[in-house]
Amino acid sequence: MKKLIGGMLLILLFTACGEDPQPKPKGYLALDFPMAEYETLDRGCPYIFEKNNWARAEKPRVNKECWVDLHYEMLDCTIFITYQPVEGNLDSLLTDAQKLPLQHTIKADAIEGDIYTNPYNNTYGMFYEVTGDAASQAQFYLTDSVKHFLTGSVYFNAKPNFDSILPAAAYLKKDIRHLMETVQWKEIE
């Protein structure tokens, strides 16, 4: 009996001398997006801009001249670009472009708008960042206030879950900013 008790004490002594258990550190999702490389997109329309090489320019489902969809296969999302000429309808184009982000207020936690001005390229507009489980995470419009009006909206091909798409939305925000900064108007003959 003394041997049994002594053996148990030895086992307890050796197992009790180990390191104290530590909680595991929180894990974070490590998403590694490729470095953006840009190329000029010129489809024979009254505008050009630089797009990320990782985005594939596609014809939109709606057959409209000078509209383009920039599809990011790796992110499973699309930036829908629309173009309309300004023909005495600037007020209604601005109203529609400013109302579009507000349609997401039901699901959005916040919608922040940043004024964009680039006198060098004669482009003026707004960039809207939508946070929360809204259908679109970013929207923008650009105009020269005289002839051209360009809008864009980001949509992910997934049920909106802001926490899940936050890294991808941040990646796209940089691409949209670059797109806006490189828009140039041109005359079509």
Image (cartoon, rainbow, N blue to C red):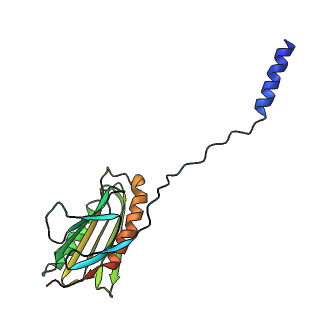
Q: Is residue 157 visible?
A: yes
Q: In which quarter of the image is residue 186?
A: bottom left
Describe residue 149's horizontal placement relative to residue 170 as left or right: left
State the residue at coordinates (37%, 65%): 172
Q: Residue furthest top?
A: 1
Q: Can residue 113 be seen in this view?
A: no
Q: In which quarter of the image is residue 57?
A: bottom left
Q: Where is residue 119 in the image (x, y as percent from the top left)?
A: 32, 87
Q: Position of residue 143 (x, y in %)?
A: 24, 79
State the residue at coordinates (41%, 68%): 36
Q: Image quadrant for the C terminus? A: bottom left
57, above or below 143, in the image: above
24, above or below 89, in the image: above
Number of numbered discs overlaid on the protein picture: 0
Describe residue 187's horizontal placement relative to residue 175 as left or right: left
74, above or below 47, in the image: above
State the residue at coordinates (83%, 17%): 5
State the residue at coordinates (37%, 72%): 38
Q: Residue furthest bottom?
A: 120
Taking depth in this image into account, of 40 and 175 the one nearest to the observer is 40
Q: Image quadrant for the N terminus? A: top right
Q: Position of residue 148 (x, y in %)?
A: 20, 80
Q: Where is residue 184 in the image (x, y as percent from the top left)?
A: 28, 82
